[in-house]
Structure formats: C-alpha cells, structure tokens
Amino acid sequence: MERIHTGEEMAALYRRHVGMVYQICLMLMKNVPDAEDATQNVFRKVMEYNKPFRDPEHEKAWLIVTARNECKNQLKHWWRKNRASEEALEHLTWEQPEDGELWEYILSLPEKYRMVLYLHYYQGYTSLETAEILGKNPSTVRTWLVQARWKLKEILEVEEYGQI
C-alpha cells in the first residue's frame, strides 16, 4: 500500500479505522472528549506519516500502536493533573460497545488486561500478533489473557452470587 496522498485516500482510511481507533482511545482515556482528541491526533499523525504502509494489516497495527501511545502520552501530560478530578470525569456519559455490562467490567481491569482483551476479542488478533503490536513477549500476552479471563470470571461470579 502506498503513502496516502489524496484527501480521498485519507477519508477512506479514516472510514475504515475510525471506530477501532476511537474504541482504543475511549478504553484508555475513559471519557469522550479526551478520546475524541486522541483519535483526532492519531489521524493527524497518519497524514504526517511519510512511509507507505506495507499492507492493510500493517496499516491497522500502526494505528493501534499510535492510538495507544497517543493516549499514554496524554495521560502522563502535566495538564491532566490541573483539571477536573477523575470522579467528575467518570460521571460523563460515553458510548460503549454493544455488550455494555461486560465492557464496564473490562474497563475496571488494569490497562494491560484491557488492551490484550480488546485486541484479541474485539479486533481478532492472535496472541502472537497482539504481542507484536504491544511490543511484548507472546507468552506474556497469553499469560495476561488467562489472568484477565480469571479476573473477569471473579467479577462476574461476585455480581451473580454476591461476595464469594
């Protein structure tokens, strides 16, 4: 795939991937305004990217890594410390995937678990592909997937049966 030169090509790339990029940003930023800002910055970076994508999978993986890095950079930025509290931000409403209740439980997990679950189950990546995208060892990703499933199981059991 060649470097994106025209507005039409950029619009097509945006239509193909905006949902995925937005969901990643929303999952990491946990509120709509910041997720929208991060999504916009990711697509701005696509326009500035000077190299061609090798294929559609490279394009998608590049967007996932760029979205994750953009969110991490925004989360550690100094201005986040000088704004409304996390409690105030949590009261904002935001769109969720169709499986809203499960999605809420996923969001309650640590970030490493959220990312591997999202990439594996929502985006369909194998553990090897997920490891490559996240820059982790494949066995680490498999371990995180197992741990994340156990944590979700514990949460669901507590919700269904009360304290265990």
Image (cartoon, rainbow, N blue to C red):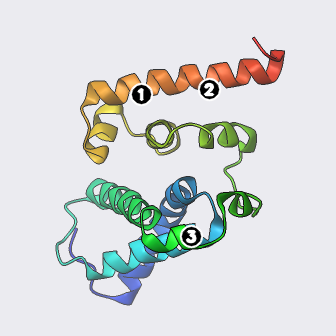
Q: Circle 1 sits on which residue?
A: 144
- In this image, 155 relative to 122: left or right? right
Q: Circle 3 sits on which residue?
A: 34
Q: Is residue 134 above or below residue 31?
A: above
Q: Residue furthest bottom?
A: 7
Q: Circle 2 sits on which residue?
A: 152
Mark 2 element type: helix
The amino acid on which the numbered mark 2 sits, given as a three-letter code, is Leu
Residue displayed at 44% across by 80% down: 11
Specify which label sits upstream in the sequence, 3 or 1.
Answer: 3
Crowding at mark 1 (Cα within 10 Å: few <14, some 14-19, many 20+) = some
Residue displayed at 40% across by 85% down: 8
Q: Residue furthest front?
A: 82
Which one is nearer the viewer's eye here, 107 or 83? 83
Residue 96: which disc? Answer: none
Could you tell me residue 96's position as x and y percent?
69, 53
